[in-house]
Image (spheres, rainbow, N blue to C red):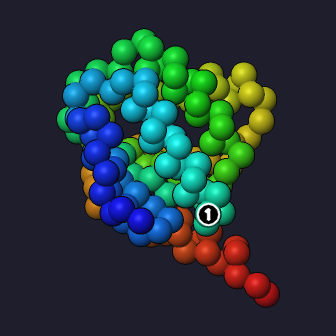
Amino acid sequence: MQRTQEIGPHTLRFLADDAFCVTLRGVVQPEEVQSIVAVELACAEKHGYVLVVIDATAVTGLPAETRREASQLLPRLKDIQGLGVIYGTSQTARVLFGMLLSAMRILSREASMFQTHFVANEAEALRQVHEARARFQSHSQPR
C-alpha cells in the first residue's frame, strides 16, 4: 500500500492500515471529496472500521458543488464504523459543517456509526484516533 498519495493539492498519508490523515490545501473540489471517501470506504471494508484525521488549517474554500457532493457521499459512511477528527477549522466552518451533518442525520432518520469530531489541534486528533482504535479493536476480539 502506498503510504502517501496526492489528491489534487491535498495530501493523504496513511498513519496505519486502519487510519489516515488528509491535509487539505486551498479550495476543495467535488472530485477530491469523491477520492477521499473512496479511500475511507475501502479502508472500512478491509478493517471493519476507519479512522480519519483531517487537517483543515490551509483550506480556503468549499464551493457549493463540493458541499453538494459531500452531502451525497457522506451518507454512504453512516453504515460503517469509524471516526473522523477535524482540526484547524474556524468557528464559522465548524458551525457550517455541523449544520450539514445535522441536516444529513435528520434526513436519513438513522443514527450513523461514523462519528465526526472537531478538535483544536493535531495532538488531540491523534489522541482521539488512538482511543477509538483501542475501542474498535477490543470489540472485534473474540471472547
In the rendered image, residue 43, in percent from the top left (x then y), is placed at: 55, 57
Image x and y of residue 90, in percent: 28, 30
Looking at the image, residue 136 lies above or below residue 94: below
Q: Is residue 75 above or below residue 12?
A: above
Q: Residues within 10 Å of mark 1 (few under 14, many from 20)?
A: few
Which quadrant holds the N terminus? bottom left
Q: Quadrant of the C terminus?
A: bottom right
How many discs appear? 1
Residue drawn at x 65%, y 33% as measured from the top left: 75
Residue farthest toward the top in the current orientation of the protein: 64
* Residue depicted at x 52% and y 49%: 40
In screen coordinates, is 71 left or right of 28? right
Q: Nearer the viewer, residue 141 or 27?
A: 27
At label 1, the amino acid type is: Lys
108 left or right of 60? right
Is 135 left, or right, of 52 in this rendering? right
At horizontal 76% and vertical 84% (from top left) the residue drawn is 142
Q: Position of residue 2 (x, y in %)?
A: 36, 62
Disc 1 is placed on an element classified as: helix
Is residue 120 in view?
no
In the image, residue 128 lies at what x, y percent? 44, 61
Residue drawn at x 61%, y 63% is 46
Q: In the figure, is residue 25 to the left or right of 74? A: left
* Residue annotated with mark 1: 46
Q: Is residue 40 visible?
A: yes
